Amino acid sequence: MPSHEEKGADFISIAVADSTRIHTQLLADAIRSDQGLQVVASASTSEELLAAVVRVPIDVIVISYNLDDQPGRGTEVLRELRVLRPQIKGVLLLDSSRSQDVLECFRAGAKGIFSKHERLESLCKCIRCVHEGQVWARSVELEHALEALANSPLVRATNHKGLDLLSARERQVVQYLAAGMTNREIAESLGLSPHTVKNYLFRIFDKLGVSSRTELLYLTMSSAQARNQDSSNGEVDEGFPGLLRAAEAGHTWAQLQLADHYSPANGSPGDPVAAYMWCLLSEKTAASMRNQIESGKDTLVRKMSPEQVREAEQRAAEWLKNTLKKSTFAEAAGPQAQNKKMLAGVP
């Protein structure tokens, strides 16, 4: 496949995902009609798309609003992709121009909204426009966005800490609320009663100085934008981006940590697709490492005497035995004892 340099400065790499393989192929063919655009990945499921994004560099991604036979799934996938690749610009394909669908697309971070009723020839213009940092949408979709903005309340949290005032469980409720879930759906996901979820919301409203779900959603969006701004100024923890870079560089430990990060836990739905993807990648990386290890062992053994080999094996067995003892003791002693050891400088 030609590189960016070989294709020229105007080369834009595209990933396409529609609800069926036939529709995906039609979109890809339409995009390929523009010689400056290169379709480097195509998919008809979120799993295929996520796997493709970690393999090849992508500038713009074109996703159907309906994916995996789920209405609105495309917006969820776009959010996940923007975590993995913040530089990717997204175009969402809509069947309709319903206000709630349009707003959900913009909230997911879409830079372009392309109606499936438009001519496919215009899709290339949309992609170029979005790639250049502009917004692509028809007047009816822009009207929905402007109307929502004009009617949005001006929200101020009662404390400068904003959402940091909330407990872990309260932030979880807010996260599910922002995903469009009802109180009953939140309750089922967290294993709570709807009445308990309602009480959580009342406490959240009181802490943040808001009076409705709508105000809470706008406050959540404002906080997310503020965090993104801090990130662009280099003022946030680089833990997750650093972990992602290490995983992409082929470090098994980082890939396993990402799998754990995305795994469902403590009532959170997580992202099983991303979790399993990183498990698969760690498995392949580990297999490659095992081959290197075996090769290295063979090379060393040929240069060692039988006595040296036995001594090395004995030392390794002793090391593993001592490590297991330390691990068992730490688990029995609990986190407080382990913290004391760490503070004392004891490994």
Image (cartoon, helix red, strand yellow):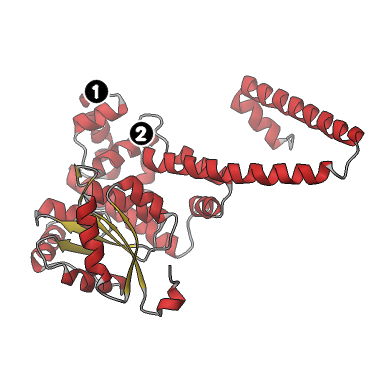
Q: Is residue 160 visible?
A: no
Disc 1 versus disc 2: nearer the observer: 2
Image quadrant assignment for residue 326: top right
* In-front residue for pair 221/86: 86
Q: Amino acid at mark 2?
A: Ser
Residue at 26 percent across and 63 percent down: it is 28
Residue 196's spot in the image, x, y percent? 25, 25
Q: Amino acid at mark 1?
A: Ser
Q: Which residue is mark 2?
A: 268
Q: Quadrant of the N terminus?
A: bottom left
Residue at 70 percent across and 43 percent down: it is 293
Residue at 27 percent across and 32 percent down: it is 200
Residue 337's spot in the image, x, y percent? 65, 26
Residue 341's spot in the image, x, y percent? 70, 31
> SS of the residue at dot 1?
loop
Mark 2 neighbour density, 10 Å: few (under 14) some (14–19) many (20 or more): some
* In-front residue for pair 46/164: 46
Name which of mark 1 and mark 2 comes first in the sequence.
Answer: 1
Viewed as shown, does residue 339 lie left or right of 93?
Answer: right
Viewed as shown, does residue 287 lie left or right of 44?
Answer: right
> SS of the residue at dot 2?
loop
* In-front residue for pair 270/307: 307
Residue 29's spot in the image, x, y percent? 24, 65
Residue at 39 percent across and 33 percent down: it is 264
Above or below 272: residue 150: below
Q: Are marks 1 and 2 in contact (CB under 8 Å)?
A: no
Above or below 321: residue 259: below
Q: Quadrant of the C terminus?
A: top right
Q: Which residue is mark 1?
A: 193
Disc 1 and disc 2: Cα gap in Å? 16 Å
Mark 1 neighbour density, 10 Å: few (under 14) some (14–19) many (20 or more): some
Q: Is residue 171 visible?
A: yes
